[in-house]
Amino acid sequence: MMMKKLVGRGLIVSMLALSIQTAGAGMIGADKAAAQADRSMVVSVLTRAETASQLQAQGVDTRAALERVAAMNDQEVSQLAADMKSAPAGADGGTILAVVVIAAAVWYFAFRK
Amino acid sequence: MNGISILKARVRAGFAVFAGCLLALLSGCAPLGQLVPQTWELRSHWPQGVPQTVELTQVPFFPQDEFQCGPAALATVLAHTGVPITPEPLVSQVWLPSRQGSLQVEMLATPRRYNRISYVLAPSYADMLREVAAGNPVLVLQDIGAVLTQWHYAVINGFDYSSGTVFLRSGTQARQEMPFTAFERTWIKSRYWAMVTMPPDKIPATAAEDAWMTAVLAMARTGDGASITTAYETALRRWPDNLQAAIGLANEHHSRGSLITAAAILRRALLARPKSVVLINNLAQTLSDQGRHGEALTLLGQADTNSPFGEEVRSTRELIEQRIEQQRSALR
């Protein structure tokens, strides 16, 4: 089970490494010349792999998790890791929940002894 | 008193207490200007140049499935920019099963996979209206819960100032009408979070230069070459002195072997920023790739050796010197 997990992780890391875009040979990329570029804050391939694993743990398919992380810049990857459990997650257009709450409250007040 | 009338009394009491609490919560006991500050501001400062009535009727509509307003809202704005998409494929890309919903950061990232640039607007009602007036439907995060928090994504595709109404594609409603005030009450909770998605050849009406370039660079991670090139071109046309747009565009041309074009872009950018080490490095590399090694070395000599890009400059110098050496040995 442990072996499977390690192999799985290794696969994720190598797949992520392949997908990183680099500028042509010898050219410095536009992202490196960013106005507020903080070169010390580069998110490593490993951190991306960790975040993809976290997504997996939250129910996302492996391949999908990799692709989702790949579309984010470094700052967003860090943010995702922090956001996953607690940030707003837009979900529903219905008022079903509110009705349930009101009904439960009425029930409680009415039938409490 | 018998059991039934006790029950009735309790139910009545319960309703009264509950209704009272609800009313207090909703009214907040505060003046209107504090409850809906930005709507209040609009009364005296309607954004200049923005018409009072706009409705983007062409914006498509995808009724959402339960909990999946994220995919539906994204499909709406993406399809509006010409992407042939429906909500279903977006579910595996933006929906988080454990949270039964979609995170904002993922809503932002997903359009890039379709060669669209996503941009978070300033937290401003006026900016949102300006974008809609410019033809860009705006995707917003609302708290639509009456009592408990209930996050929800919807798309604004119009407004009418005289009746004080905004129009949304929301949930299962193709045309939801909300008063400006009520909408602000739902929107204020997300700190006025709003985003637009743009095709590579367009820039949002309220885009700020640096923030837009960050958005373009993010798209460049996963976009196709043609879209990335168009995005840089469009940005450079709008902001001719933008360093990243020049570097990015030149790199795109360089990677496709259009060395003359790449060199021209870099040269032009150097006129405005003669000390930029990145420009110097990249132009030197390009010149050398064209066989103009001597010129390249001379140029490279202008680079400040204490620059954070010192390593890259050294590598480029070594490469060029190697090439010169190879040329010499070939001639012997």
Image: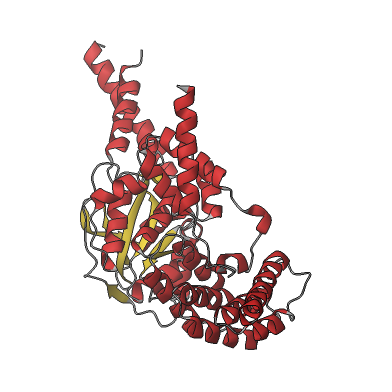
Location of the C terminus of chain B by quadrant is bottom right
Q: Position of residue B319 (x, y in %)?
A: 65, 70
**Which corner quadrant of the image does residue B59 belong to?**
bottom left
- Of A11 and B51, the residue lying toward us: A11
| Viewer can see residue B204 | no
**Which corner quadrant of the image does residue B73 belong to?**
bottom left
Q: Position of residue B272 (x, y in %)?
A: 64, 86
Q: Would residue B243 be found to the left or right of residue A103 on screen?
A: right
Q: Is residue B213 above or below residue B113?
A: below
Q: Position of residue A55 (x, y in %)?
A: 43, 39
- Of B217 and B81, the residue lying toward us: B217
User: Which residue shows up at 42% across the image and 56% down it?
Assistant: B108
Q: Would residue B315 be found to the left or right of residue A7 on screen?
A: right
Q: Position of residue B138 (x, y in %)?
A: 36, 64
Count of numbered circles in the view: 0
User: Which residue shows up at 69% across the image and 70% down it?
Assistant: B318
- Of A65 and B317, the residue lying toward us: B317
Query: How did the renderer colour the structure?
Result: secondary structure
Location of the N terminus of chain B by quadrant is top left
Q: Would residue B35 be found to the left or right of residue A103 on screen?
A: right
Extreme-front residue of the structure? B332
User: Which residue shows up at 54% across the image and 42% down it?
Assistant: A82
| Viewer can see residue B324 | yes
